[in-house]
Image: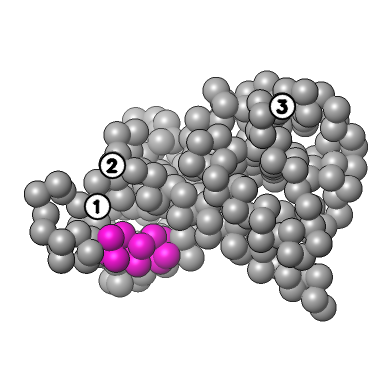
């Protein structure tokens, strides 16, 4: 299930709860937390801990999201492989349909899992900041630059901190009314570990990632989590970059709304 990302470390008892839910998803509507604990041979505390681990406020919130995902899955093509959406031996028509299915599924997954309140908060933080420094490496850096180009048209001028390898120099000179935005699918500990530690001491910080459960989640002021769909081995970063573009387009939309109204 999308609600239980594979890159989160679960205890054995938490895995038992997930296994029960996945195999009895049509029975979840009338289950209480006590019922679920009994049926999965775990405990209420385990279920509450699991709920918090997947960013739910408690069992009721978890249950609502499970039911929502179940209903949305009726519209998903569950055969889509986000890491290898097509094969080298596929004919052109099959490849065309595979890419279309990839993006159709991506839109639905992102629509249902991105927290809109956090997107609105990110837009507010950008509007309220004196300077905005944005961090991104490789393909993600290209996506970040695209966002910067878009918001320039709104008279907002973020600085791409990774330009010319100046990120360490820049992050040591941020001020309290500045904002640092870090974007990385899952490798931000290696890419931005130093920069996050340095920036969070002096200015507000935002982290956009598919890997929310690390020590850094408590160091940043705002954590925006995107679904974890890609495997380490993949033909290209189709889903991850589309996910970042989706998030940045949402932020742009709220910035546009705030500057126009």
> How would you rate the neighbour count of disc 2 (Cα within 10 Å): few for under 14, some for 14-19, many for 20 or more?
some
Indicate the colouring scheme: one colour
The answer for how far apart the CA atoms under marks 2 and 1 are is 8 Å
Dot in front, 3 or 2: 3
- Residue at 61% from the left image edge and 64% from the top image edge: 250
- Residue at 59% from the left image edge and 38% from the top image edge: 136
Q: Residue 231: image x %, image y %?
A: 33, 38
Q: Viewed as shown, does residue 119 lie left or right of 198?
A: left
Residue 253 drawn in magenta: no
Answer with the quarter of the image where residue 259 lies.
Answer: bottom right
The answer for how far apart the CA atoms under marks 3 and 2 are is 30 Å
Any part of residue 90 in sight: yes
Label for residue 85? 1
- Identify residue for label 2: 235
- Residue at 81% from the left image edge and 24% from the top image edge: 172
Give the extent of the magenta segment.
Answer: 99-109
Label for residue 128? none
Callouts 2 and 1 close, C-beta under 8 Å:
yes
Q: Viewed as shown, does residue 94 lie left or right of 237?
A: left
Q: Regarding mark 3 in the picture, which secondary structure is present there?
A: loop
Q: Residue 132: image x %, image y %?
A: 78, 45
């Amino acid at each position: 299930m999308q609600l239980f990302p594979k890159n989160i470390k679960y205890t054995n008892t938490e895995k038992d709860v997930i296994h029960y839910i996945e195999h009895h998803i049509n029975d979840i509507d009338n289950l209480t937390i006590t019922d679920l604990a009994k049926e999965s041979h775990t405990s209420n505390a385990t279920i509450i801990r699991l709920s918090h681990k997947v960013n739910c406020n408690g069992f009721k919130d978890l249950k609502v999201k499970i039911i929502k995902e179940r209903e949305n899955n009726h519209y998903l093509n569950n055969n889509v492989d986000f890491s290898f959406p097509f094969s080298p031996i596929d004919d052109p028509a099959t490849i065309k349909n595979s890419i279309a299915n990839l993006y159709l599924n991506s839109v639905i997954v992102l629509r249902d899992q991105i927290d809109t309140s956090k997107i609105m908060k990110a837009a507010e933080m950008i509007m309220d900041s004196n300077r905005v420094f944005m961090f991104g490496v490789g393909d993600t850096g290209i996506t970040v630059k695209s966002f910067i180009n878009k918001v320039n048209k709104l008279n907002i001028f973020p600085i791409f901190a990774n330009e010319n390898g100046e990120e360490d120099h820049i992050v040591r000179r941020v001020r309290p009314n500045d904002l640092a935005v870090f974007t990385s699918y899952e490798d931000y500990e290696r890419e931005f570990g130093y920069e996050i530690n340095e920036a969070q001491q002096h200015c507000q910080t935002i982290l956009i990632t598919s890997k929310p459960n690390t020590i850094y989640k408590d160091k940043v002021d705002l954590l925006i989590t995107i679904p974890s769909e890609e495997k380490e081995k993949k033909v290209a970063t189709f889903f991850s970059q589309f996910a970042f573009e989706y998030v940045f387009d949402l932020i742009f939309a709220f910035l546009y709304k705030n500057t126009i109204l």
